[in-house]
Image (cartoon, rainbow, N blue to C red):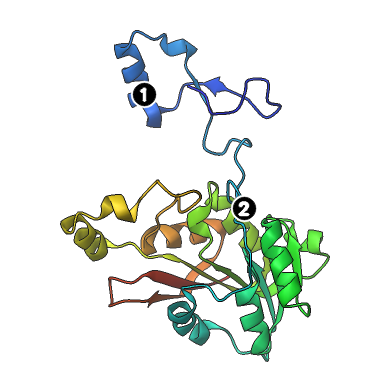
Amino acid sequence: MRCGCSPDHPLYAPVPFTSPDLSWIASLALLNQYDYDSLTFIPAYSPCVSAMKVEPLRYNSAAEPFDYHYLWQAIRPLLPVQQTYKRILDVGCGNGFWANRFAEIGYEVVGIDPSETGVEQAREAYPGIRFEVMEIGTDICRQLGVDRFDVVVSLEVVEHLYLPRQWAAGCFAACRPGGRLICSTPYHGYLKNLVVSLANRWDHHFSPLWDGGHIKFWSRATLTELLLGAGFQKHGLIFRGAGRLPLMWMAMVLSIRR
């Protein structure tokens, strides 16, 4: 089995099929009279795949996002006091709307996003804020030529990523010791999942029929595990649901300390 890259691709590097976690594929191959030893696969962390969006989103304005109001109600109380937390890095800033919202209440903000159209709209609409076309990485502060940030914010981003651990490691590296990461993603949990099942709405909820979209679906437990694995501290973690009734939330917001 191979990924969609051509064997001539410089990053194409098949490896022997030995993973015990994927032994079911070997069984399937044997049933179909394939040679087990000849099977190869590209692991999920293959460099053929970007950590950020497969195709960066395209923006034609700096308009307010549809989720602004319910997310802002959850995020605003989590923003640290500006006397000791002044600088924010907005990871996946899109069209710059959120970065500008933080700047309006007194923070110094830098926004990054892989979308050239998003950064173009952001620079045009909010010329007083620095925006750069780049992805998050562990050397992001060196690339930007700045010290680590007091707060890293990344809203509705992690659900789009093939390599969320790279995103988490980059956010950790960009955040100063004692600083905080505030991130949000669509909420999934037992009760909400049960209601979606009873309503027979999974085809709609997980619809693959739109370009781009979400490829990872996070719960409070899995997102917390991701962030703790990157080095963030469990002590002082704050969780907030956003939108709809409790346990049926549209989104969840986590604030976690480095």
Q: Residue 35: horizontal and vertical position, in percent?
A: 42, 8
Q: Residue 9: horizontal and vertical position, in percent?
A: 68, 25
The residue nearer to you, when weighing 220 against 59, is 59
Taking 203 as reference, is 113 above or below it? below
The residue nearer to you, when weighing 52 against 25, is 52
Q: Residue at x 78, y 70 (%)?
A: 147
Q: Secondary structure at mark 1?
A: helix
Lower sequence index among marks 2 and 1: 1
Q: Residues within 10 Å of mark 1 (few under 14, many from 20)?
A: some
Q: Secondary structure at mark 2?
A: loop
Camera-near label (2 vs 1) is: 2
Taking 83 as reference, is 237 above or below it? above
Q: Is residue 148 visible?
A: no
Q: Residue 71: horizontal and vertical position, in percent?
A: 46, 77
Residue to which mark 1 is pinned: 25
* Amino acid type of the residue tagged 1 in the rendering: Ile
Residue to which mark 2 is pinned: 56
In this image, 94 relative to 33: left or right?
right
* Image quadrant where residue 106 sits: bottom right
* Image quadrant where residue 252 sits: bottom left
